[in-house]
Amino acid sequence: MAWVTDFAPTTVELNACIDCGLCLPVCPTFGVTGDESASPRGRIAAMRAVDRRLVEVDERFAEVMGLCLQCRACEVACPSLVQFGRLMEGARAEVAAQLPDWRTVATRTVFGRAIASRSAVVLLSWVVGAVQRMHLASVLPGSAAKATALRTIPLPVPTTAGHEWLPEGEPIGTVGFLAGCVMDQWYSDVHTAVIQVLRTAGYRVVAPKNQTCCGALAAHEGAAYDAAKMAAQNVEAFDGFDLVVVDSAGCSAHMKGYGHWADGGDDLASRIIDANELIATLLDADLLPHIEGDTPIAVQDPCHLRHAQGIAEEPREILRAAGYSPVETDPAGTCCGAAGAYQLDHPEMSAILGMAKSTQVRATGLNLVASANPGCEMQLKAHLDSGTVVAHPIELYWDALRSR
């Protein structure tokens, strides 16, 4: 038996890899281990072996696929344009389907079902918010202690879906807005900043009530059919919007690949725009003001912004417009080790990469960092000094704009 799901890697996709090895130097897990099986080329070799029925999807295959961060740095280095992120999602869907165990059930329950339920996420947010206020997070064991790196969740828990915001001044159009899942409650300040900046530029912003989680976490964790259901629901929810704005790098990267996940997905994918992209365009068009200043700020590039979407200059443009002077921390854009649920599944590797990233930030001597992805923010705050502030570039711009 080779593949059993509708999302499995295809022979054509696998054969696109020419085994050149240019991916090896940019792969974080290969850099730590030096093990070929921990590289994109090695993982593709394992997938090919299954595709050719030379080996089965077994525990060793699951280990090889599981160690990947899915940072997609290899896609940028690849001369053959191998869609490695898609291959990994397909391989993990096969592991989940062929090796069902307690973890598979838990993964599907959390990332495939619960995270798509707004009421379930709100309930979880109430619990986490209460734990934060009772100062219990710091005494939680193991990976649960990472709750200390979360922002304080507002109580009552805010919800963005089902609301709309009218523009200030001359209207220039209407955009849809992804509320998302944990982003909506845990990083509501980011949503507020993005919405207010868009209103300032003249946009009416609408967050449809019938939208759901983008499905990225489900896809990354092998819950492929659940990810497809979420994509289909969002295709319906955002029908009719010329642009759909997304302010989490992981979410915007995934939704730009919706053509693989749902009928009509290509159409929605073509209308997805990361908030950094849109606001940088508005600044270029002088629809938003530039604020003078040159306060230094360290910049961390989320993998799904820089590698998956090719968005690197836009956050820096927004920071400069907010009166900051961006300071580079890592020209290579190496993964910080957060990678969604990866920090829970592979805490040791995640910690190694998180400490390396924090060392790069500390080398700047700055205690203010810009990052456009919630997982990256959590990872940075977990490994940096408690006095270090990590914020979304658009948050910083909105703060500067309203304090003029």
Image: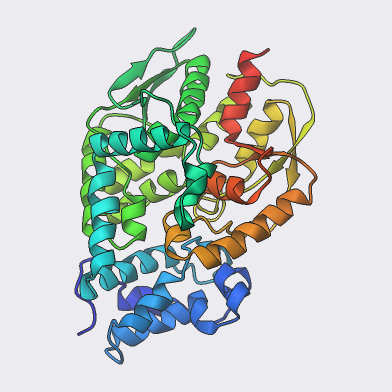
- Colour pattern of the rendering: rainbow
Q: Nearer the viewer, residue 58 or 125?
A: 125
Q: Quadrant of residue 109?
A: bottom left
In the picture as drawn, the residue positioned furthest to the bottom comes out as: 54
In the picture provided, is 107 more to the left or to the right than 24? left
Q: Residue 54: horizontal and vertical position, in percent? A: 30, 92
Q: Residue 143: horizontal and vertical position, in percent? A: 47, 56
Image quarter (top left, top right, bottom left or bottom right) of the N terminus: bottom left
At x 58%, y 22%, the residue is: 398
Q: Residue 173: horizontal and vertical position, in percent? A: 40, 19
Q: Residue 207: horizontal and vertical position, in percent? A: 32, 26
At x 26%, y 72%, the residue is: 94
Q: Quadrant of residue 46?
A: bottom left
In the picture provided, is 128 more to the left or to the right than 350? left
Image quarter (top left, top right, bottom left or bottom right) of the C terminus: top right
Q: Nearer the viewer, residue 352 or 275?
A: 352
In the picture provided, is 77 more to the left or to the right than 40? right
In the picture as drawn, the residue positioned furthest to the top comes out as: 169
At x 67%, y 32%, the residue is: 319
Residue 120 seen in render = yes
Is 60 rendered above or below residue 394?
below
In the picture provided, is 268 more to the left or to the right than 293? left
Residue 75 seen in render = no
Is 37 rendered above or below residue 354?
below
Q: How many marks?
A: 0
Q: Quadrant of residue 366?
A: top right
